[in-house]
Amino acid sequence: MAQEATPEISPPMAAAPPDDGQWTMPAKNYASTRYSELTEITQENVGKLQVVFTFSTGINKGHEAAPLVVGQTMYVVTPYPNILYALDLSKPGAPMKWRFEPRPEPASQGVACCDVVNRGAAFFAGRIYFNTLDGHAIAVDAETGQQVWNTKIGNINIGETVTMAPLVVKGKVLVGNSGGELGVRGWIKALDAGDGHVVWTAYSTGPDADVLIGPDFKPFYQQDRGKDLGVTTWPPDAWQIGGGNMWGWISYDPELNLIYHGTGNPGPWNPDLRPGDNKWTAGIFARDPDTGQAKWFYQWTPHDLHDYDGINEQILLDMTWNGQPRKVLVRPERNGYVYVLDRTTGEVLSAEPFGPVNSSNGVDLKTGLLIVNSEKATSTGKVVRDICPTASGLKDWQPSAFSPRTGLLYIPHNNLCMDAEGTEVNYIAGTPYVGMNVRMIPGPGGHRGAFTAWDIAAAKPVWSLKENFPVWSGALVTAGDVVFYGTMEGWFKAISARTGKLLWQFKTSSGIIGQPITYRGPDGHQYVAVLAGVGGWAGAVVTGDLDPRDATAALGFANAMKDLKDVTAAGGSLYVFRLP
């Protein structure tokens, strides 16, 4: 549902305070805008950007993290073995101040579904917080690099890993688990930032008491009301191995005192083996950060047929919607729609496709329900061809950026479809629990990726750039009206936030799937930083050295990425740029 242009869309001030030139969490702020107010780099001069220093992490796996900048120090966390580096920005070449090596269990590599990635760290009150692949949350003194605490929160023996970046809210470190392809039951935990003890745990499946659903829970839609839906919307006991993992992004509204987080795919992928809506998977919760108690829930994709998950970023904005001031959250979702929700109530205000979608025919705004296209529904022993989008969605974890100057959301995404066939599968702890043969293929037009500027008020794209490979990097936008993103070939690009025109590009040593950031250096100048190092699910054909002739390798992604080995090699390097 479109509407007339609105004068102003901006994040709530409490969730996006004035820019201090640092970058202390991957999303920049609690509103998750990934927007910087720095203006030294402009559309006019960005073409002069040059490298000021590089740093090799020594790890040749997928680098999905955002570097952090706090004061005069940059912090970088690597994929497994999850080394945390501190670099001194006050000295030429940014020499290493210290490194912290947590030495995670080597066996964790074998149960990570889609490369051994880590999406970054968070800074709070003099400490750096990050997670390790083998399921530990760790606090390190930001100045000395000494461990403050280390809490084991996951169990690799059942296939549980942790790849997400934590978020620290009101002295609590929020973190969730991965393992949706191994029948791991999803959760989000809050740990005390001071000593690391677990304050609360909210599961994505099971009885209301486990999900932290109580008297405050008031979902907007009828289908989300009722007792113990996390049990009754599953076959008997299937919820115990039903997924719903929380490995993506969290936002926080300090005024409403609510955190927002998605839930991942139900397990197994084969929907025939789990009849029902499979609550509370592939949806979004609003929770009280103090207690974890749920306030509302909305399910993007009930009874997920295609591994669409629901863990993407949500950008918190205040805007006028159809003449009324609304507190909204905007979510470009894997199932192919940009959703605008009222973040107070969970009501869907708008849901429009941002690329090719045929697995569904829209969202019913009266009921909030996805209108599933039965012709593209998967089932056991039946091959369904040309399902768009593919399992990794029209957009996966790779986070978008929002500029209050343009009112546009800048979305890095995929253009892939798939052929899929459901198979029988039995649960064995710590082993794949998928039940689906998938073969991914390029989407309409043949390009496999795109970078799209989306007008939130008008609910439509303004411009879109085609890329040969999926755009698996994050996006960054600045008050200089420059947008940055990277490609899987290794190009780091700067484009106009207004027109999408290419203004500058630099070829790095490996494909880019990291999250670019910008900061004010100790010298007062604006810098831009990004990690290069191909990998992730999309780049597994390179980092896992998979045989591109195996069409179903990497859960089918290898089939669409056969030529990636021809254009990039594995790597792991930080690049930092500034104007001369």
Image (cartoon, rainbow, N blue to C red):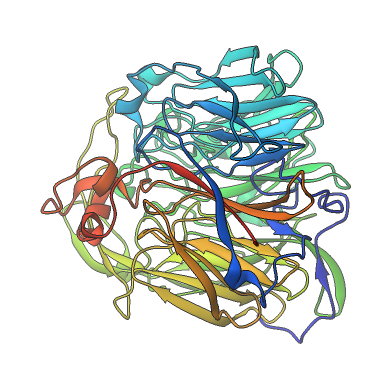
Instruction: Between residue 171 and residue 514, name the one nearer to us.
Output: 514
- Which of the 4 image quadrants contains residue 491? bottom left
Instruction: Between residue 255 and residue 61, name the one nearer to us.
Output: 61
Where does the image place residue 166, in percent across and percent down from the top left? 63, 34
Where does the image place residue 285, in percent across and percent down from the top left? 66, 45
Quadrant in which the N terminus appears: bottom right
Residue visible at 80% across and 54% down?
A: 344
Residue visible at 42% across and 53% down?
A: 304
From where the camera sits, is residue 82 visible?
Answer: yes
Seen in the picture, residue 307 relative to 373 is either above or below; the reply is above
Residue visible at 36% across and 32% down?
A: 112
Seen in the picture, residue 493 relative to 501 is either above or below; the reply is above
Where does the image place residue 128, in percent across and percent down from the top left? 67, 27
Seen in the picture, residue 167 relative to 338 is either above or below; the reply is above
Instruction: Between residue 63 and residue 558, name the one nearer to us.
Output: 63
Q: How many marks?
A: 0
Image-based side of 144 in relation to 268, left or right: right
From where the camera sits, is residue 319 visible?
Answer: no
Image-based side of 171 in relation to 461, left or right: right
Quadrant in which the C terminus appears: bottom right
